[in-house]
Image (cartoon, rainbow, N blue to C red):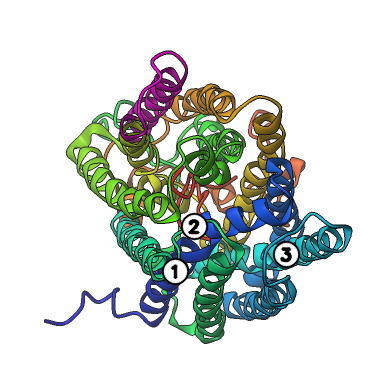
Amino acid sequence: MPLPVHLSNHNVKLALALVGISGLADSVWAGTALVAYLYIISDGSNSKVGYVEAAQGLATVLTALPIGYVADHYGRSKACRIGSVALFAAIGMTLFAVIRDIQDGIGDDTDDQEESQLGYLFMLVAMCMMGLGGGVVSGPVQALYADSIPTGQRSQYYVYLFGVYLMASCVGPAVTIVIFQSGSNSWTLDELRDVIYVGMGLEFVCACMLLFFRDDCALGEEADHLEALKSDEEEGPAEDGEKAEAPASSLNMLCSRQQRIPLLTFVASLITALGSGMTVKFFPLFFKNDCSLSPSAVQGIYVAVPIAIIVFSGFAQRLASTGFGRVQAVILSKMIGVSCLVIMVLCLREFDAPWPVIVAVYLLRTGIMNCTYPLEESVTMDFVPKAYRARWKSLESVAQFGWCGSAALGGYLADRFDYSFTFLITAAVQGSAILIWGLLIPYIPRHERSREDSIDRATPDDSLEKPLIGEDHQASHFDDPQAAQVASGFGEYRGAPVQEEEGG
């Protein structure tokens, strides 16, 4: 049976394949194996694990807008090639750092400590380069993916993207289980190195795939942004003889609406990322140190995590499509997810629950909290002009930096207090982000619409074509002073289409 016409698009197929390989690579090495490796060579310091995440995020945020500018002005494919070069450099540095480390683990003498410190510094620089490459995957690549999909169909295609990544993320931990089981199934540098080698091989494939994206395969006007819409509650039947031109006050309201939507989704994503960063990289260490689970057991949890996310993602998508609304589905999911994290802390502190109960609550929380990425991304891309999507997607790295930057704080808090303390702070911060999502309810129609439908319903005004962060946007652009970005959670799977976190 032939593929749907847009699934046969070169960029759509390549993006789906790239995200699948990227998801496989990340789930093999960038989660449990990497943080455990860093934890060992840094002499059991959660803070140093957090510093690596912060450095990676800083590298991403410093290069994000320049990369987005290149993508919007010189072509998405050229930006993809820059990301390819960065990934090749990161792979080489990671392999160099791992190969040069001492073969028998970290000893107590001074030479061994100096050797491990040097290896840690090499990994720090390598992860900075990996952050640049991951920013291209989550920025220009996904902007080109959005450009190759008709407006009004993006939430479904982001479900495809999300599903491919998560299915690959199921396979990755299973691969590492085989690697650990073939050895001693213990937290040793030798076994962690083997996992990292496999991950680097997969990252090499991703770097090669970035060379083959094509700007000439993007769609034209049918993939452009929506005009500002009135919500379903605000719309009513047009009066006979009603003029197409609205009063100036209505124009100003719609201009403001067009800009508020991506801005509010960005703020909500940033707040969520700040909370998530304190825990995302420390869940594997929590299972390792506090629950005393073996490497295979921890990876078994991460086999189940993507399955839970896929299941709940399907429920969220169907709920939104019934007329419940995309934003409403996001809010409900995040409320349940935050509540589950609080329950998890109570199980740890008040009831001394056994680890199977903790794992069950963790899986429920992670599945629900991370299931809304397709809905969030479709809202964002539907209201960002096509010519500026790469910069808006690159701006997501600001949220990623918030996530990675708060990882340094999370590492400090885990060393100073314990892991459950950081979980509770994460719940409080993520709960506040739900309030921002609530502000979007008046602006987003409950039913997803095509661009043609939005043009029929919207008030025409050329100023709506000007994005908040475009180079032509000036304070004087609007005649009225009352008329004055974006990211959904990608979260926290590094360089991947997930809004919250890797299993967190």
Q: Is residue 420 above or below residue 468?
A: above
Q: Which residues are magenta?
A: 329-357
Give the x, y percent position of residue 13. 36, 77
Q: Position of residue 52 (x, y in %)?
A: 72, 53
Mark 3 lies on residue:
123
Quadrant of the image containing the N terminus = bottom left
Q: Secondary structure at mark 1?
A: loop
The three-letter amino acid code for the residue at tag 1 is: Gly
Residue 470 shows in this picture:
no
Tell me if residue 50 can be seen.
yes
Magenta-span inclusion, residue 53 = no
Out of 294 and 226, give the one closest to the viewer: 294
Give residue 183's mark: 1
| Cα separation between marks 2 and 1 | 8 Å
Q: Main secondary structure of the magenta part?
A: helix
Q: Nearer the viewer, mark 3 or mark 1?
A: 1
Residue underneath mark 2: 186
Q: Residue 90, how many percent across, how many down?
A: 68, 73
Q: Nearer the viewer, residue 163 or 199?
A: 199
Q: Which residue is drawn at the image coordinates 58% and 23% (left, top)? A: 421
Callout 2 touching callout 1 (CB < 8 Å): yes
Q: Is 105 placed left or right of 338 in the picture?
A: right
Left or right: residue 470 versus residue 117 is left
**Magenta stretch: residue 346 in it?**
yes
Mark 1 crowdedness (10 Å alpha carbons): few <14, some 14-19, many ≥20:
few
